[in-house]
Amino acid sequence: MRKLFGTDGIRGVAGEAPLDKRTVRAVGVALAISLKQTGKPVRVVMGMDTRESGPWIAAMLAAGLREGGAAVANAGVITTPAIAFLARKHGFSAGVVISASHNPWQDNGIKIFGGDGYKLPDNVELGIEAEIERVLEGSGPRVQGSDGGLPEVNESFRAEYVQFLLEAVPGISLDNRKVVIDCANGAASSVAPQLFESLRGTVEVTHASPDGRNINLNCGALHPEIVAAEVKVRGASMGFTFDGDADRALFADEHGNVVNGDAVMLACARDLQRRGELAGDLVVATTMSNMGLEAAFKRSGISMLRAPVGDKYVLEEMRRSGASLGGEQSGHILFPAKATTGDGLLTALLVLDLVHRNGKTLGELIADLKNFPQVILNVKVRERKPLDSLPSVVEKISAAEEELRDSGRVVIRYSGTEALARVMIEAESEEAMRRHAEAIAEAIRAELGI
């Protein structure tokens, strides 16, 4: 069982284990040792989002990588998918991003991509964890004291990534539309303005002034209602909003309605199907996607598979099933023909292109998506005991499943990135949905709450 890696890398409060200086350095040493097993020279490209802890974490990680025998290149502040792209393009052994994605500024994390641009499989992460333990226990290379700093930022990396995005969607244009972009005061702030301002339209950029502590603060993909309101106020035709490292995107339509990942998958799947590019008429979503999406797909002759939450698990299922589209309700959308990981900026460009080619607004393209009422309650927990070992929780879950058997879904899981239990219920009856969600959340709170 993994102790350090969650569903998206190693994550925690900056300065506290596992993101204390000694452990971060050990992660670098362990990663370098693991990569050396290929017998080839080890080269790693690093980037980070805009948190104030990013530079010191990157410096400690780089020091560990060098101790383990790796050379390090620095892309500076840049999006997570940009690092995946650069690792693959330049033949790096791995790409590393210092980011906690949608988490608040106090948190940070370490995300690792292989040289192929894909996130590491669980078994590889387990091997790295074992090496980290050896380093910390003293049976591996000793973790030294000085850090040596970061290499100078290679400014050409960002330009290469912007060029890749533009080439991925040839001829993309705003067609003189006005759009609003919310950069979440995160990594998108370093890329999105340059990218979108070349597209022949009016671009109004918001939340692109990071100060190290305002990342995701009342903005970005955690708060899509913010960009939706701006679309209405500014009379724009569409809005885009990203999370802290810009690997996911949510949208607002021309009426100022929030458009989540489910709706984006529906629009993209139908477009790919019309062009004969939706392999097997199949889409991979997750356990969190709404039953309404499944119903809309069915009307279009599209099948939907559900993977565990986490974009890397979606991608693993896509590779198994041969699907050409997948994603999460939260805005990670995967286009394997275009990129190896979820990319919010790429998704935004592809949605713009879809709207242009279909001659319809985003709202018109998803008008028939009727979601079941859905609620997600987050319960802070002090530990992650197996839920099936808690009789009171099992009782409440069983009661909900029995009543909602033919008219809803119950999904209870621990977050892979935060100390939370997530209670998700969908039901035709909103009253039943809320009643059962609150009952289950209260049972978890009584057993494990802080």
Image (cartoon, grey):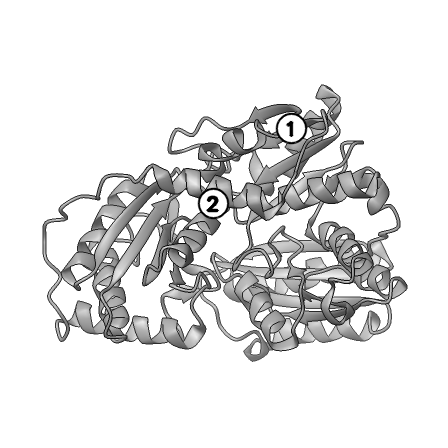
Taking the spot 13% from the left edge, 75% from the top edge, the residue there is 139
Give the residue at mark 1: 180
Instruction: Please identify the quadrant where the N terminus is shown.
Output: bottom left
Position in image of residue 434 (x %, y %)? 76, 55
Q: Please give left or right for residue 315 compared with residue 114 in the image.
A: right
Q: Can residue 77 be seen at all in this image of the molecule? A: no
Q: Earlier in the sequence, mark 1 or mark 2?
A: 1
Q: Position of residue 177 (x, y in %)?
A: 72, 26
Residue 221 versus residue 97: which sits nearer the camera? Answer: 97
The amino acid type found where label 2 is placed reads Asp
| Residue at x 62%, y 47% (from the top left corner) | 347
Q: Secondary structure at mark 2?
A: loop
Question: Taking 57 as reference, is 110 left or right?
Answer: right
Q: Which residue is drawn at the image coordinates 61% and 45% (left, top)?
A: 249
Residue assigned mark 2: 245
**On screen, 449 above or below 356?**
below
> Residue 309, how many percent across, how many down?
59, 64
Q: Residues within 10 Å of mark 1 (few under 14, many from 20)?
A: many
Give the CA separation, mark 1 to mark 2.
Answer: 18 Å
Q: Position of residue 296 (x, y in %)?
A: 85, 59
Please name the amino acid that badge 1 sits on: Val
Circle 1: element type: strand
